[in-house]
Image (cartoon, rainbow, N blue to C red):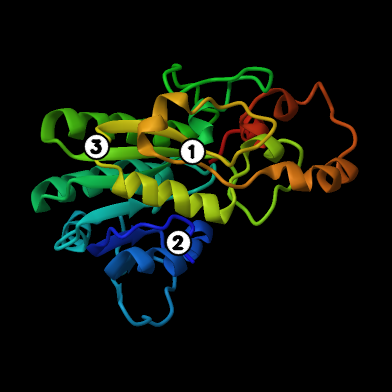
Amino acid sequence: MPAHPTPLRFKRLLLTGAAGGLGRELRTRLKAYCDTLRLSDIAELGDAAPGEELRPARLEDKAAVNDLLGGVDAVVHLGGVSVEAPFEPILQANIVGVFHVYEAARRHGVKRIVFASSNHVTGFYRQDEVIDTRVPVRPDGLYGLSKAFGENLAQLYFDRHGIETVCVRIGSSFAEPKDRRMLASWMSFDDLERVVVSALTAPVVGCSVIYGISDNATRWYDNSRAAHIGYRPQDSSERFRAAVEARQPALDRSDPATVYQGGAFVRTGPLE
């Protein structure tokens, strides 16, 4: 049964980054909400299942991205560099690439995008703070900086061209939390589906920002300003707490990764 039951269906959805970790999860789930799921990545996508279209494209290739968005109703944009990296690949995939996605959406009349932003947009807030979606960005690296650019670009294309976007600041979406930091930032795969489908189907979203987390007992993110999206997480990291704390009973309070919400990203050195 879908994690977010809805009778609404799209004729064609585009999922970029479909070969990545979260892309692979959503590939198996989003087909329930559309007649055709168009999948794109530069990595191997395997064979097309019934109802799938495979359209590899490099995000820095303007013409390829323009073709990619032809005939789609909405976009779930996960594509790009998903970790801290040297500036050049981040520039091409996450900055030039997201610009190409929005320009192609404008040309083809695509009016709804779900943009995979990141908790690393605000990674230099402390773990003893609770922040909402209106705080100034505090990126913890070049990756987080590129996602802040994507959020600003989304706002520009809504204000100027009426393209609605939900920017989902994804926390830590894995099968289970790996450490004590993730007890606050974790989002289950079912809740990932719920937030994406809520973002696709909410009647009016404008340009909204929402934190992509589950209903965790420990939390740094206040999603109250994003209630209009209709996302209600159903899972919690709490059932993993005992195992996580047993694996990591002590924390180094002098380690910036323990102090700041971005974790290890805040102490990644210069990348050449």
Q: Which secondary structure, mark 1?
A: strand
Q: In the rendered structure, which amino acid carries the disc numbered 1? A: Ser
Mark 1 or mark 3, earlier in chain: 1
Q: Which secondary structure, mark 3?
A: loop
Residue occupied by mark 2: 26
Disc number at residue 102? none
Disc number at residue 118? 1
Circle nearer the viewer, 2 or 3: 3
**Rendered position, 178 above or below 34:** above
**Rendered position, 194 above or below 12:** above
Residue occupied by mark 3: 204
Q: Residues within 10 Å of mark 1 (few under 14, many from 20)?
A: many
Q: In the rendered structure, which amino acid carries the disc numbered 2? A: Leu
* Point 67% across, 33% down: residue: 263
Left or right of residue 261, residue 5 in this image: left
Left or right of residue 142, residue 104 in this image: left
Measured from the top left, where is residue 14 in percent x and y?
29, 61
Which residue is more in the foreground, 168 or 147? Answer: 168
* Point 53% across, 33% down: residue: 120
Left or right of residue 131, residue 266 in this image: right
Question: Alpha-carbon distance for marks 2 and 3?
Answer: 23 Å
- Quarter residue 233 falls in: top right
Q: Is residue 19 visible?
A: no
Question: Alpha-carbon distance for marks 1 and 3?
Answer: 22 Å
